[in-house]
Image (tube, rainbow, N blue to C red):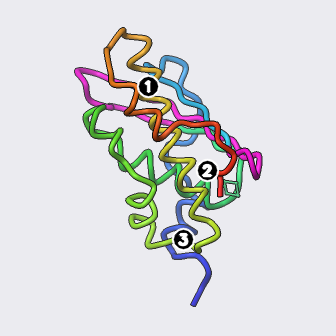
Amino acid sequence: MALYSDKVMDHFQNPRNVGKMDDADGVGEVGNAKCGDIMKMYIKVKDGIITDCKFNTFGCGSAIATSSMATELIKGKKVEDALELSNKAVVEALDGLPAHKIHCSVLAEEAVAAAVKDYYDRNGIAYDPELFSKKLHDCEHCAE
Ligand code: FES
């Protein structure tokens, strides 16, 4: 069996929603302390809905594929629903990833959360810090 699914290869070779967004309502940047890869996620929000989403990933193929899939999954969703996006859901949508590449999908989940947090912060929207403390941490061990 091939190491990577057709979907992973497709999103790696033809990533969706790549680029920078100058008028983003929320921007999140996260990095993996172990491999040094960096992911930046931009969201545009209107009436509580994510109307557009872009990303830039300086990282491995799996990180590119997972960020691409993550943008597809959160576009059109309510902001609070995007926060529920798990790395597991991203991996499933890609028809799986090799075990040693699962941590790359965590980066995508974190990048979405960081963009949502930035959106909340910019707009003075109150939130439970717990929501993000589980997702956004600088713990090196979590990069495994
Ligand atoms: Fe760094 Fe994949 S190896 S995110």
State which quadrant residue 84 falls in. Answer: top left
Q: Which mark is residue 142?
A: 2
Q: SS class of the residue under badge 3?
A: loop
| Horizontal and vertical percent position of residue 136 | 53, 36
Q: What are the residue bounds of the magenta stretch? A: 32-54
- Residue topped by disc 1: 117
Give the dominant element type of the magenta stretch: helix, strand or loop.
strand
The residue drawn where x is 48% and y is 69% is 7
Upstream in sequence: badge 2 or badge 1: 1
Marks 2/3: CA–CA distance: 18 Å
Question: Residue 62 in magenta?
Answer: no
The residue drawn where x is 37% and y is 33% is 131
- Tag in front: 2 or 1: 2
- Tag in front: 2 or 3: 2
Callout 1 touching callout 3 (CB < 8 Å):
no
Q: SS class of the residue under badge 1?
A: helix
- Residue topped by disc 3: 97
Question: Residue 38 in magenta?
Answer: yes
Which residue type carries mark 2? Cys
In this rendered view, identify the residue nearer to me: 134 or 58. Answer: 134
| Horizontal and vertical percent position of residue 77 | 27, 39
Q: Tell whether 79 sits left or right of 110.
A: left
The residue drawn where x is 65% and y is 58% is 144
Marks 1/3: CA–CA distance: 27 Å
| Horizontal and vertical percent position of residue 43 | 43, 29
Upstream in sequence: badge 1 or badge 3: 3
